[in-house]
Image (cartoon, rainbow, N blue to C red):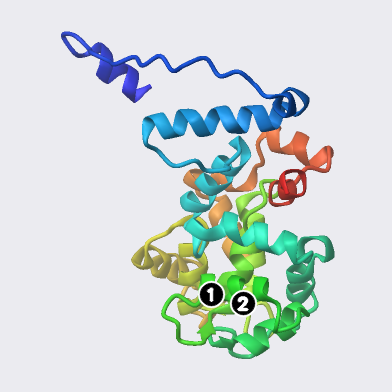
Amino acid sequence: MKLLWLTLSQVYSSCEIEFLPVYNPSDEEKRDPKLFAHNVRAVMAKALGVPVMDYTYDDCKLITRAKEMNLPNSNALLEVQKIRHKLKLDDNRTEEYIVNSKLLCQNCSRLTFLEFANYLNVPCTDPLLQQLFRLYDKNSSGVIDFREYLLGVLGLPFTRSIIDTVKIAFKIYDRTGQGKIPAEDLAKILSHTLAMPYSEAVDTFQQVAKSETEFVTFEQLSAHLERKAEFASLFTISKEEKMKSRNGEICPNDYKKNN
């Protein structure tokens, strides 16, 4: 829409049209429409001088949601999901089991590769697992924040509301196992789910805790946000995504169709 208005506001607009030679499909391409479409796309991309990326419409929606929520490592989450599918982690719902069974480490902010492999129950010699670890080991320090990995994976599906993602984040960042979160961790949760600035997150903690305690629970935070009109959308799922949920379609598992 913005591009349309900018175009209409110009006295005149110019464009260049290039007609490519007619692409005649081979016998193999006639038998395989996907191969034909792939090769035509490659020819067009080469003529335009642009790269080719295998992103679907759902992929674009997925990464947009991740960026809007400010999920950890949002730029790499599509690659993360593809690797998880190849490792069959999505089939086993491994990360969900880790969080719900309270098997989280005491200091998940500094997890080594061997510990990472142990938690995911994948051999440490697997090159795909090594690739997955490197996506989160930004400084090549040999350790990652396991909480960021779990939140990126479990916070992504469209089939849950954002407030449900906040609830999952509470479980991930709960160091005591009692459902209570200090101000520092609440700031990280709100930053990586609601894209809330640190100062605003601290103010939210103070409003919820009311100087009575050094911790807040998910129930307290949820009740506080529900009273705020600006957060009403957190408690809903779009009609389109409800339909996907009923049909058993979950975006991160779409890679089963594509790979």
- Secondary structure of the residue carrying tag 2 is helix
Q: Residue 149 placed where, x, y %?
A: 59, 70
Tell me the number on the disc at residue 164: none
Asked whether, in this view, residue 52 is left or right of residue 12, the answer is right
* Residue 123 in which image quadrant: bottom right
Residue 182 seen anywhere in this rendered image of the structure: yes
The residue under label 2 is which amino acid type?
A: Gln
Q: Which residue is mark 2?
A: 130
Name the amino acid, label 1: Arg
Q: Residues within 10 Å of mark 2 (few under 14, many from 20)?
A: some
In percent of the image, x 61 and y 52: which residue is there? 162
Crowding near the residue tagged with mark 1, few <14, some 14–19, many ≥20 C-alpha atoms within 10 Å: some
Q: Is residue 71 above or below residue 256?
A: below
Q: In which quadrant of the rendered view does residue 244 lie?
A: top right
Q: Is residue 206 above or below residue 6?
A: below
- Residue in the picture at 45% in, 33% down: 45
Asked whether the residues under the numbered discs 2 and 1 touch, taking CB atoms below 8 Å apart as contact, a structural biologist would say yes
User: Which quadrant, please, contains the N terminus?
Assistant: top left
Circle 1 residue: 134
Task: Determine the residue positioned at 50% across, 43% down.
Answer: 229
